[in-house]
Amino acid sequence: MSAVSEKPAMNPMVDAQSVHKRFGRLKVLKGITMSVPAGAVVCLIGPSGSGKSTFLRCINHLEKIEAGRLYVDGELVGYREKHGTLYEMKDREVCGKRAEIGMVFQQFNLFPHFTALQNIIESPVRVKRVPKAAAVERARELLEQVGLADKADAYPSQLSGGQQQRVAIARALAMEPKLMLFDEPTSALDPELVGDVLAVMKQLAEQGMTMIVVTHEMGFAREVADAVYFLDGGVIVESGAPAAVLSNPQHERTRSFLSKVL
Amino acid sequence: MSDSPVMPDQGTSKSDSSPDAPSGASGEAIRAIPVKHYWRWVGAVIALLLAAVVIRLFVLSPNIDWGAVREFLTVPRIMAGLRLTLIYTVLSMALAVVLAVTMAVMRMSVNPVLSTISWLYIWLFRGTPALLQILFWFNIGLIIPKLWIGIPFTEIYFEADTNRVISTSVAAVLALGVCEGAYLAEIVRAGIQSVEYGQSEAALALGMKRSLAFRRIILPQAMRAIIPPTGNEFIGMLKTTSLVSVIAARELMTEAQNIAAQNFLTIELLIVAASWYLFVTTIMTIGQYYIERYYARGSSNRDLPPTPIQRMRASFRRLLLPAGGSVPSASGRTTS
């Protein structure tokens, strides 16, 4: 199968080719194909259970895919391909790949026993072996960037949801990722706190970060995304520029979904 | 009172028009006469009387020689026994903790061989009496007369008499530690499983290896659930060491009984031993509070749990203050 091992000429940051995933007998992804160029912002929308979060988790190999090919920056996710044979990657290699991909969760998942600053420096210091002083300096810059310079010593339980999520974004950025995955980053927030998080994400997009965002924030998708994919039942129903998909959907399922969320 | 109004606006108030009711709308502080809890006082008095009777029976008993208790409290043999008890407790708990964490991790392993071995270990050592295990380890030389360490197919080896290696003390520590490890393993497993899955997922997404995520992220959070029952087990172990008297280890309990066998001051020496057990237990309890406070960092309850002294002060205050309603909630919040 040399055809699939052939890398595209201009490496997209994420290249999914007919990705399949199932949990037991439940097929969650039934052939997802998409290409995300470096520097692009892509929003995945769709009803719950449509597979968007699962697809996101496949990209950093938190979930294993069963069929298809998934490349990040031109390299297979979770496997090495040699002479047409796939070899599963060792844990250590998978960790190395994950370290290059930032992920932000719906429930923030900050480490509650660490302060904001400790949350941010933990992985750079322990995984990338950055000297602690440098990591702390970088963490303070990042906290500044997300507007929480004064919260370095606060524990997550002392922060609001919006603040926690911004710390979580700073924590992911501290690893200097080449790709950021956002899994419904504002869904667990009070409406009035959503704006702060979206502002940070927008700023990140403007700096040229490649971002894949699972979201229900259609305003954000419209304003920031380069492309929007509508998923339903494990397949991409419709995709394209945000204006086209969100304002002039071609498929009935897209239309009925948008009529409910807008 | 049968005609007391249920509907909110009944123009004419009937019977109980209390004088300080009307102007309550503007946020005035409530100054009410508290309910009198007469039965609380009655209960307290009865309990105190009973306590006094019990204390009188013991303290003033002509059959207890308190002078002898004081005399034997610090004799060298008792002190040596106490030292040995502490050493057995600490060493066997250390062994138990290492075994417990290993077994808990093995139990949750995806490798069926490892999880089965862990299951069997817990099944075996939790399912047989500690006393039996102590005797078993002490007599292990009957099964394996010689211990042998060497490199296979070479002449390099080291051999020793089992009974020489497994002395009384080693048998005691092995038996107590291995037995306790089985209980602790379940406590550790419960603690690890109490940590949200999102935590390990976040750690993995940051590129951490499983071992690092476990050590830095999962275990410290699991500690919050692990520490209280482990404190229990630690105190339990302190007392369980008294079982090794069956293999003539000369720890506190054995020494107390040995002395009593010579001078017939049975009760007095039991009191001596009891005093020391209580003393050490008290120290341990205080230590446990401070460890719990340490691991409570960043917990959703923003105030740290009170220290024993703070708790004591708070409960005294609760006892003395008549107003029952508002005080208990304040008791846990005092951090001065």
Image: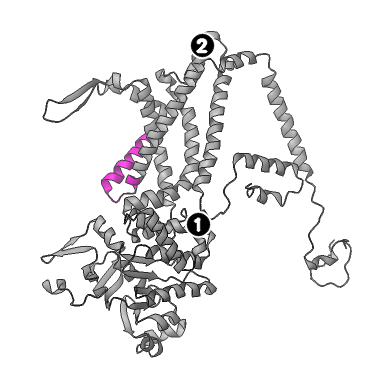
Within-10-Å neighbours for mark 2: few <14, some 14–19, many 20+:
few
Q: Amino acid at mark 2?
A: Ala
Q: Which chain does tag 2 point to?
A: B
Q: Position of residue A26 (x, y in %)?
A: 31, 68
Q: Position of residue A10 (x, y in %)?
A: 21, 77
Is residue B129 visible to the viewer in this orientation of the structure? no
Distance CA(mark 1)–CA(mark 2): 62 Å
Q: Amino acid at mark 1?
A: Asp
Q: Nearer the viewer, residue A1 or A176?
A: A176
Residue at the image point whose x is 34% and y is 58% from the top: B204
User: Which label lies toward us, 1 or 2?
Assistant: 1
Q: What residue did someone put label 1 on?
A: A153
Q: Position of residue A174 (x, y in %)?
A: 37, 63
Q: Quadrant of the N terminus of chain B?
A: bottom right
Question: In the image, B287: left or right of B127?
Answer: right
Q: Residue B261 bears which disc, if any?
A: 2
Q: Is residue B127 magenta?
A: yes
Within-10-Å neighbours for mark 1: few <14, some 14–19, many 20+:
few
Outermost residue on the top side: it is B262
Is residue A9 visible to the viewer in this orientation of the structure? yes
Question: In the image, A30: left or right of A152?
Answer: left
- Indicate the quadrant where residue A206 lies: bottom left
- Local SS, label 1: loop
